[in-house]
């Protein structure tokens, strides 16, 4: 008789814990969307993206001069 009570008690505790865990995940908040950028942030969009550059370096003791090009992402 005592073993049945212990088994029933353990089963009841397991079911109760499972219900609490399920309720915690079921009522969790949905992730919110990122906020819409303000006009100040939209002005900074000009600086994002891929950039290409070119130039000419001068001859120095470190090496000869010449034209150069590159890309930045």
Image (cartoon, rainbow, N blue to C red):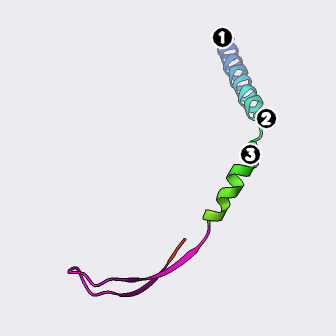
Residue 13 position by quadrant:
top right
Position of 1 relative to 72 (above/below): above
Q: Residue at x 59, y 73 (%)?
A: 50
Left or right position of 19 against 70: right
Left or right position of 43 against 57: right
- Where does label 3 land, which residue? 35
- Where does label 2 land, which residue? 26
Q: Residue at x 69, y 57 (%)?
A: 43
Identify the secondary structure beneath mark 3. loop
Residue range of the region highlighted in magenta in the rendering: 49-70
Question: Upstream in the sequence, badge 1 or badge 3?
Answer: 1
- Where does label 1 land, which residue? 2
CB within 8 Å, label 2 to label 3: no
Residue 71 visible in rendering: yes
Q: CA distance from mark 2 to mark 3?
A: 25 Å
Residue 1, x across and y down, in percent: 69, 11
């Amino acid at each position: 008789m005592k073993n049945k009570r212990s088994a029933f008690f353990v089963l009841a505790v397991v079911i109760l814990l499972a219900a609490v865990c399920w309720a915690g995940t079921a009522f969790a908040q949905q992730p919110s969307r990122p906020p819409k950028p303000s006009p100040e942030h939209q002005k900074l969009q000009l600086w994002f993206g891929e950039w290409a550059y070119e130039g000419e370096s001068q001859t120095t003791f470190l090496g000869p001069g010449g034209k150069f090009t590159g890309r930045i992402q």
